[in-house]
Amino acid sequence: MTFPSHPRNTRKNIMSFFKGKNSNFPDTARRAITVSAETRATVSDRVDFKTQIVKFDADTESDLIELISVANTEDSSRRTTKGLILVFDKNIASSTYSVGDPDFPFKIANYYETATIPSFTTSFSYNPVSGTFTVDTITVTSDKLLYQIDFNFKGVNSHTNEELEIIGSSTYLIFMRPM
């Protein structure tokens, strides 16, 4: 499985197909979405990654959902953020999945960091080349999604060949309430 190498392109590509007219989700345009989530991780050669800032989106053409945990958002320049992007089917089965397995259920799974030089901001994606993601799907209803995802993977940046070990866990609780 290949993963996009640039989070901005990844986000743009995801969002472009998350704008269809048909939906397997309730009419999300008329539903208030609340996200209560937390991601904690240890990233090699970095300070610990901890955040409760998680962005959620749902594909209107399928059951795919996108969860982006973002840290360092208090940086007023927004040029040194880091994050974890996961895109998967909301009905994902509880299991341990190995990176590289033909049945690996994540359409996108990567860790990224933004970086800056004067007048330019870029990002570095670390796509998994080995490791596991353990998913506990607790609740999947039209009003609530609840997942516990533990991850332990080696991510590699395709441009620099830098390797990072990313080990952690995320709890994602999404409420979709009628307006």
Image (cartoon, grey):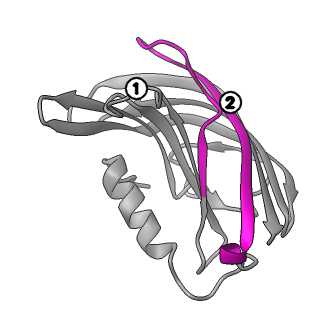
| Viewer-side residue, 53 vs 150 | 53
- Residue 62, given in percent of the width and then of the height, sits at 62, 77
Please rate how many residues cluster around mark 1, counting C-alpha atoms within 10 Å: few if below 14, some from 14 to 19, many from 20. Answer: few
Instruction: Compute the Cα span from label 1 to label 2.
Output: 23 Å
Q: Secondary structure at mark 2?
A: strand
- Residue 8, given in percent of the width and then of the height, sits at 33, 51
Q: Which SS type dominates the magenta stretch?
A: strand
Q: What range is drawn magenta here?
A: 28-56
- In the image, which disc is placed on residue 66? none
Residue 104 appearing in the image: no
- Residue 31, given in percent of the width and then of the height, sits at 74, 70
- Is 84 placed left or right of 80 in the picture? right
Please rate how many residues cluster around mark 2, counting C-alpha atoms within 10 Å: few if below 14, some from 14 to 19, many from 20. Answer: many
Residue in view at x 61 percent, y 58 percent: 88
Q: Which residue is mark 1?
A: 75
Residue in view at x 53 percent, y 31 percent: 153
- In the image, which disc is placed on residue 169? 2
